[in-house]
Amino acid sequence: MHPSLPALLALCLLLGACSPTTPLFIAQITTNEVVEYKTMKSKRMAAAVEEEGDLLTYSAMAIRDAKSPEAEELYLVGYRDDKFSDDVRAIALYQIGLIYMSRFNEQRDDTKALAYLERVLNEFPGSRAAERAEARILVIRQRAKDPVQKTSRELLATWQPSSNLDLYKPGLDPDMTLLSRRAVLKDRVAEAEELYLLALSDAHVQPDIKQKALYQLGLMYLAPDNPHANRDKAIGYFRRLLVQFPDSDLATKASRHLDQALNSDRP
């Protein structure tokens, strides 16, 4: 049995700290090449996340580490498990499509991406992912008409991070996932909330994922950089975590954030 599959899509790979093992470097490369490679990998992930806000943390790390096939296999295990809701299974296919269509992915394959995105439409037409998949299909078809197709390395050579998307901004809680961080900085918290709530509503998603989902929801609505910060919603999510999962590993942190929110003058 796969070690953590019910964490499926590590639905929302809420596990930001659980990064896949970085592939070993080829023995012959020089020190300077190692430094350059590390920098490029860091830029690759930032560029991919900035371009596509729906990438889950695990998907972004797969692009960074050139592990697209491995991520594809993991998501497919979740997709094939019909105990998950259609919405969750659709997200699995959708994430594979996003990974392979990323212009910053060295393993980019628009044909494969298109096939997975079309499967979302065909198999789960009523899912939340279907509408988003349709928009990405249009992007792929449109850029296929471009006579110049730059490689990911060529694109990275000239890529500069957006001034308003500092994913490691000091004001963001260190426990926030990439999904939560980008949602706050790009005013897309409502969309991220919808995704996290899918984990909470699906009976087959493991309790540890549900706990992390509630914690992320609380952090997003408490974030000072969230244009729609809502202390009451944050308090509600932290309280729900403590009531439903009193023995959670996150209970202490949630309690601390709850106390801070209750004693804050900020609305």
Image: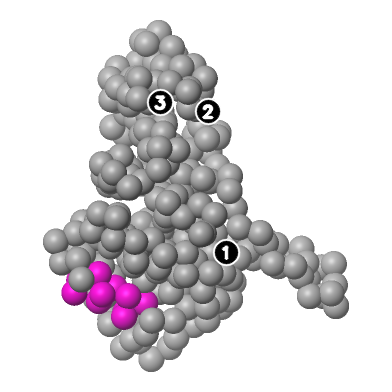
Q: Measured from the top left, where is residue 31 in percent x and y? A: 85, 67
Tell me the magenta residue range. 113-122
User: Please, is residue 58 above or below residue 37 in the view?
Assistant: above
**Would you say 138 lies left or right of 175 here?**
left
Q: Nearest to the eye among marks 1 and 3: give it.
A: 3
Residue 84: which disc? none
Query: How many residues crowd mark 1 within 10 Å: few (<14), some (14–19), many (20+)?
Result: many
User: Please, is residue 56 above or below residue 114 in the view?
Assistant: above
Residue ID for mark 3: 245
Residue at (34% x, 66% y) in the render: 80
Residue 64: which disc? 1
Residue at (15% x, 66% y) in the render: 125
Q: Amino acid at mark 1?
A: Arg
- In the image, residue 179 lies in the stretch drawn in magenta: no
Residue at (51% x, 59% y) in the render: 1
Query: How many residues crowd mark 3 within 10 Å: few (<14), some (14–19), many (20+)?
Result: some
Residue ID for mark 2: 249
User: Please, is residue 225 above or below residue 49 in the view?
Assistant: above
Q: Secondary structure at mark 3?
A: loop
Q: Amino acid at mark 2?
A: Asp
Mark yes or no: residue 259 visible: yes
Residue at (29% x, 61% y) in the render: 82
